[in-house]
């Protein structure tokens, strides 16, 4: 597949009718010469709570979730390089560089010790960050993100376990990509979950509907997680598909075995976008883990 960034365009009138009404402010931080990262500050007071999105997503992925924590925390969310409103450089998509980017943002904001909440592939980044900079991590929360993807690929390749069926997503039609609004409807319909609208629009606007063909998407690398070096308390919330779970059950057990202060919550029948499909359960589990009560919002 060609590593080509294809950016969709939409009529100005179609874009102008939509406004992001979530309470946050947008900022940029230079993390490397010629590379700025976009982040959202949701406000709040208290210890810093930092959200990291899954592959292809942006800080806006947490528009409907992060505000629930501003009563006890100062909440921010970062968009990694290569996606959304962050810069799209030609290189820097290995895990160590992505972690260096996160550290640069925290240094710029003078955040010396934080709690991370990471969705999906962001689990790679928060694990390495915690292993590399243990003094800068209070706690870790994985939203369907605590998986050894290298081990998973090996187990599937050598036929130790069957490959999961995976998600079947129909390709969009020309009508589905004719405007941002049409694309939002397509993504929500095809994924079966209401991904925050701003996230879909920013991806469509900056990365195009063929985001999986982009250079950044193709260049992201993974590594075996250094779970045994993670000293911070960690909570892994998993979406469990009981009909197709042999591989994932092995990976969940690996987290249990290797993370010294790990906790696991399994939500059966949940979507990979677990904090959207099972918002209330995730909020309760995270707030209990963080010692922030069980407030819902």
Image (cartoon, rainbow, N blue to C red):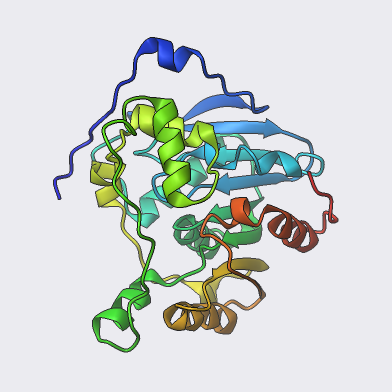
Which residue occupies the extreme bottom position in the image?
160
In the rendered image, residue 115, in percent from the top left (x then y), is placed at 66, 53
Tell me if I can see residue 48 in this picture.
yes
- At horizontal 51% and vertical 67% (from top left) the residue drawn is 146
Decide if residue 295 is on the left or right side of residue 70.
right
Tell me if I can see residue 232 in this picture.
no
- Image quarter hosting the C terminus: top right
Total numbered circles: 0
- At horizontal 82% and vertical 59% (from top left) the residue drawn is 291
Which residue occupies the extreme left position in the image?
2
In the rendered image, residue 165, in percent from the top left (x then y), is placed at 36, 71
Q: Quadrant of residue 138?
A: bottom right
Decide if residue 36 is on the left or right side of residue 271.
left
- At horizontal 30% and vertical 46% (from top left) the residue drawn is 92
In the rendered image, residue 243, in percent from the top left (x then y), is placed at 48, 78
The one of 7 and 29 positioned closer to us in this rendering: 7
The one of 146 and 30 positioned closer to us in this rendering: 146
In the rendered image, residue 144, in percent from the top left (x then y), is placed at 54, 63
- At horizontal 48% and vertical 43% (from top left) the residue drawn is 188
Above or below residue 39? Residue 214 is below
Q: Quadrant of residue 106?
A: top right
């Amino acid at each position: 597949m060609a590593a080509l960034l294809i950016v969709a365009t939409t009529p100005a009138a179609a874009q102008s009718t939509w406004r992001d009404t979530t309470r946050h402010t947008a900022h940029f931080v230079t993390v490397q010469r010629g590379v700025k990262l976009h982040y959202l500050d949701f406000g709040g007071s208290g210890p810093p709570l930092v959200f990291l999105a899954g592959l292809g997503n942006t800080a806006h992925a947490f528009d409907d979730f992060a505000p629930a924590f501003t009563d006890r925390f100062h909440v921010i969310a970062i968009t990694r390089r290569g996606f959304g409103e962050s810069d799209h450089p030609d290189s820097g998509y290995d895990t160590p560089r992505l972690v260096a980017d996160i550290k640069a943002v925290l240094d710029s904001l003078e955040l010396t010790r934080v709690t991370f909440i990471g969705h999906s592939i962001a689990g790679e980044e928060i694990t390495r960050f915690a292993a590399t900079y243990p003094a800068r991590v209070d706690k870790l929360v994985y939203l369907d993100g605590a998986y050894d993807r290298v081990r998973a690929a090996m187990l599937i390749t050598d036929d130790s376990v069957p490959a999961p069926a995976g998600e079947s997503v129909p390709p969009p039609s020309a009508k589905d990509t004719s405007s941002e609004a049409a694309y939002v409807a397509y993504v929500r319909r095809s994924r079966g979950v209401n991904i925050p609208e701003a996230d879909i629009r920013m991806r469509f606007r900056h990365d195009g509907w063929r985001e999986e063909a982009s250079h950044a998407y193709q260049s992201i690398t993974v590594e075996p997680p250094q779970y045994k070096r993670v000293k911070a308390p960690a909570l892994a919330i998993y979406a469990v598909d009981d009909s197709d779970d042999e591989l994932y059950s092995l990976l969940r057990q690996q987290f249990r075995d290797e993370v010294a202060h790990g906790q696991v919550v399994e939500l059966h029948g949940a979507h990979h976008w677990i904090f959207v499909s099972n918002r209330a359960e995730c909020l309760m589990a995270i707030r209990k883990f963080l010692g922030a009560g069980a407030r819902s919002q």
